[in-house]
Image: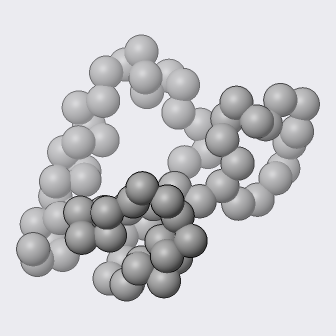
Amino acid sequence: MEKEKFEAIVLNTLKNIPDKFKDKIKNLSIVIEEKDIRPVLKDKKNVRTKYTLGLYQGLPATKRAGRRNILP
């Protein structure tokens, strides 16, 4: 897939997120880059590298209670 087409899909998807979820999204960056993520995924279990288009790296919101200014 061409990068421009993928970017358009991502932007359209972000625009169509329901407001009840948009209100919960804070401090989020979406970075689109051509990068082989297979080396990152090699330590992950139950991940199909062929079908993975993205990866969240950071501390889950459920584990951040009481913590601030933590970088992924």
The residue lying at 83 percent from left, 29 percent from top is 65
Residue occupying the point 16% across, 53% down = 9
Could you tell whether 19 is left or right of 8 in the image?
Answer: right
Residue 40 vs residue 16, the one in the foreground? 40
Q: Residue 57 is drawn in which quadrant?
A: bottom right
Q: Quadrant of residue 52?
A: bottom left
Location of residue 16 in the rendering, given as x and y in whole percent from the top left corner: 23, 32
Residue 63, x across and y down, in percent: 76, 36
Which quarter of the rendered picture does the N terminus lie within?
A: bottom left
Q: Is residue 32 left or right of residue 2?
A: right
Task: Point out the residue furthest to the front here.
Answer: 46
Coloring basis for residues = one colour
Q: Nearer the viewer, residue 59 or 50?
A: 50
Numbered label tally: 0
Q: Position of residue 46 (x, y in %)?
A: 42, 56
- Placement of 13 over or under 53, stated as above or below: above
In the current view of this chain or complex, which residue is farthest to the right?
66
Quadrant location, the C terminus: bottom right
Which residue is found at the position 25% from the left and 53% from the top? 10
Extreme residue toward the top, this view: 20
Q: Position of residue 51 (x, y in %)?
A: 23, 63
Taking the image as shown, residue 68 lies to the left or right of residue 59, namely right
Figure quadrant of residue 47: bottom left
Q: Is residue 68 above or below residue 36?
A: above
